[in-house]
């Protein structure tokens, strides 16, 4: 038989990976790349719970692995929650900086009609 023009090229090369295998390999490569660039130990919202899953304390979401959590941190929900928290902290810090109201002295006067 002529195997020259078939998928996989040479005989015994193992053939082409299926779609699920290529997706799994791609996710693993992305997870490794993200773990190299992002340090999860410094992430204040990353937490591993007692079940062994990972949790985002900001969004209250559960993730089965670090790769899923890292994908979540790049997502729309996490980014909008980060923006909301930054705006709230900025607003609270501006409340603290506002000038303090002037303190008025209490007038002391003798009240008429009290038994002395």
Image (cartoon, grey):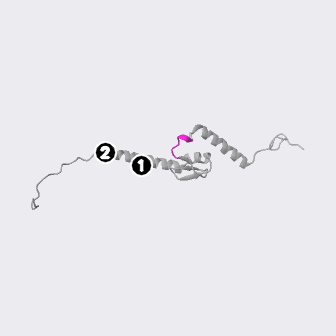
Question: Which one is in front, 9 or 44?
Answer: 44
* Residue 115: percent from left, percent from top: 10, 61
Residue 74 visible (yes or no): no
Q: Quadrant of the C terminus?
A: bottom left
Q: Position of residue 90 (x, y in %)?
A: 40, 45
Residue contact between numbered discs 2 and 1, judged by CB atoms under 8 Å: no
User: Which residue is nearer to you in this view: 75 or 67?
Assistant: 67
Q: Which residue shows up at 48% across the image and 47% down it?
A: 82
Q: Reply yes or no: does residue 80 show up in magenta.
A: no
Q: Earlier in the sequence, mark 2 or mark 1?
A: 1
Q: Residues within 10 Å of mark 2 (few under 14, many from 20)?
A: few
According to the image, label 1 marks what residue? 88
What residue is at 66 percent from the left and 41 percent from the top?
29
Element under disc 2: loop
Within the image, what quadrant is residue 9 found in?
A: top right
Judging by the rendered image, the residue that carries numbered circle 2 is 98
The answer to whether 34 appears left or right of 3 in the picture is left
**Residue 24 location in percent, x, y?**
69, 46
Count up the numbered dots. 2
Give the position of the N terminus as an image quadrant. top right
Q: Which residue in the rendered view is the most extreme toward the right?
A: 1
Tag 1, which secondary structure? helix
Q: Position of residue 88 (x, y in %)?
A: 41, 49
Residue 93 in view here: yes
Residue numbers of the magenta segment: 40-45
Label number found at residue 14: none
Q: Is residue 42 magenta?
A: yes
Other residues around mark 1 within 10 Å, as few (<14) / some (14–19) / many (≥20)? few
Q: Is residue 111 left or right of residue 51?
A: left
Instruction: Give the Cα separation between the discs numbered 2 and 1.
Output: 16 Å
């Amino acid at each position: 038989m002529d195997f020259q023009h078939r998928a996989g090229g040479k005989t015994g090369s193992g053939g082409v990976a299926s779609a699920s295998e290529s997706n799994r390999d791609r996710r693993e490569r992305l997870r490794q790349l993200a773990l190299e660039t992002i340090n999860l130990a410094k992430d204040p919202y990353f937490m591993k719970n007692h079940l062994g899953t990972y949790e985002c304390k900001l969004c209250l979401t559960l993730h089965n692995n670090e790769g899923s959590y890292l994908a979540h941190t790049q997502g729309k929900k996490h980014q909008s929650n980060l923006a909301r928290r930054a705006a709230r902290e900025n607003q609270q810090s501006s409340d603290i900086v506002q000038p303090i109201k002037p303190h008025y002295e209490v007038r002391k006067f003798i009240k008429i009609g009290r038994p002395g």
